[in-house]
Amino acid sequence: MKTTAVSLFLCASIVLSLAACDRNGADEGNRFSATYHAGDSKDETDTNTYAHINDDGPFKKYEKPITVTLGRQGIAGNNLPNGDTLEDNEFLKYVEDRLNVNVIYEFSIEDVDDYNQKVSLAIANNSMPDMMVVNEQQFKEMAGADMLADLTPFYETYSSPLIKDYYKSFSDDRVLNTGRIGGKLYGLPNTNIDGTYQLLWVRKDWLDKLQLKLPSSMDDVQAIARAFKELDPDQNGKSDTVGLLGDKQIVGDAEFFTFDPIFNQYHSYPKSWFKDADDNIVYGSTTPETKEALVKLRDMYKEGLIDREFLTRKWQDNAALVSGGRAGILFAPWFAGWMLADSVKTDPKAEWVPLAAPLDEDGKRNVVPSAPSGTFLVVNKHAKHPEAALKMLSVEYEGIRLIDPKSHELYKDEIVSWLNYPLNVQLDFQDSLARDIPIYDKVLTDNDLQDMPARLIKRVNAILKNRKEPKQDITAFADSLAYYTGGAVTGTKEITKVDPIFYGTTETMVKKGTSLDKLENETFLRIITGAAPIEDFDKFVSTWKLSGGDEVTQEVAASLN
């Protein structure tokens, strides 16, 4: 089923640090750290408008100190300086001091599976701390067991305007509603920003050498993959370049090297749920359009336009092909700019451009938005101060976004993970990434940093530095390639969002999802590589339905009523 938002959050915090992660946070290790420089937090257009207002609500300090208990996932490879720890650091003290709150960690467990086991044990024993961040299934289980505080009476008074605006940026309250059950707010959901879908990244310097134009259609993509494989684009006299890179995961939100854009070009949306023309609920991996896309991928693989060794390559192997100058066309999100920048170390002339391609017959790049949320901050029904969760979150985000001037001094000039704040809940505007592009444009036009939000200063300086001295500072070049060049494409007019009707997890998904996913992935890989005929797709659909797919479909339908 669809990759959960919680895995995306915990493995690299794309939303807050805007860094990329491996697909499950464990098998290959984090490729980019979930860190930020003081002055370089995540994207939104908030300003001091939000600072220190409504002082009788979210920012009012408790007259007498209160104690709250917290259970949370720890931080693998935490990089705190000066002997600081998750339980004793400047970010935590900042929140404690502003509110007169004493935070006690009942547990902090790094491994996600071990953490989930601890949460499950707390549920079973009805022994949860005052606050925890849990996944969707745990949230529903706890709400069903009447373990959670109703936050409805506290939300309006104790949530800062910024927190409210984050949730309001998602139309029809669709994010905040995921935390409501029976009309009551039992959990504060995280938010996932738009823009983590795959772009087509191409080496323009290779296109220029081969006198090829920037691609837009599927035919263009194939022609370029063919040329890059066969026509020696690096002009080293060797047959050592490959075509389109691939990944054995095939599709996935925010993934590198997957084939989502090719499926989407055929109006196929694997692992997502929709209604067809007859109003029937349909799993996107089972549609005729998906079969058509598999035929195209099979033909491309047979011709060698897709890297023949993609089945055995790991993420690092593909990244090495890029940095070594052997690959020049791939699908990846905007934040691939950091990985692609490594190729400049090998070849300073390497020039990567991101594109919203391939386009369908109507000139659209169809994309499935990320699940709007996937984790929930919950409060024990018996907590003495349930409103403290909202107050802590409000104060925390004044620090994370550098709205409060005092927060600028926290770990100044250090690189420290924002996750060391007590509540590891990612929040942002839905269109966060696109909101900052006009700011970059204006600065590049007038070179004026006046009134620049503090959180953007280092990022803008990197973009300005790279504009003045292109590629001389690889870090500045990488930031510019990701935040500015890649980020700008995520908001282009060709992007057309295709919203699923369902993002969550059902009971049968939990029980049978692993086997159903394995059936799907193995069938698709065998078809793409020619190990199985295309007719096996029809067998897959039948087997999927009989093996639990029909049950899942019924559960999805029931959840919509």
Image (cartoon, rainbow, N blue to C red):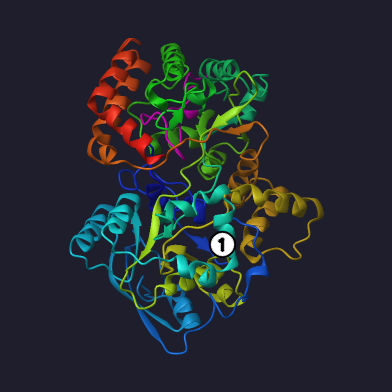
Examine the structure image and report whether residue 231 is included in the region drawn in magenta.
no
Residue 246 in which image quadrant: top left
Q: Which residue is mark 1?
A: 164
Above or below: residue 100 compared with residue 386: below
Q: Position of residue 119 (x, y in %)?
A: 25, 60
Span colored in magenta: 237-260
Looking at the rendering, in which quadrant would you find the N terminus? Answer: top left
Q: Main secondary structure of the magenta part?
A: loop
| Residue 247 part of the magenta-drawn span | yes
Q: Nearer the viewer, residue 259 or 375?
A: 375
* Left or right of residue 188: residue 540: left
Residue 436 in the image: state x and y as whole percent.
66, 52
- Whether residue 123 sits left or right of residue 356 in the image: it is left
Q: Camera-side residue: 407 or 553?
A: 553
Looking at the rendered structure, the number of numbered marks drawn on it comes to: 1
- Picture coordinates of residue 417, whole percent (x, y): 45, 63
Q: Residue at x 37, y 41 (%)?
A: 559
Q: Is residue 417 in sight in this rendering?
A: no
Is residue 172 something that shows in the picture?
yes
Q: Quadrant of the C terminus?
A: top left
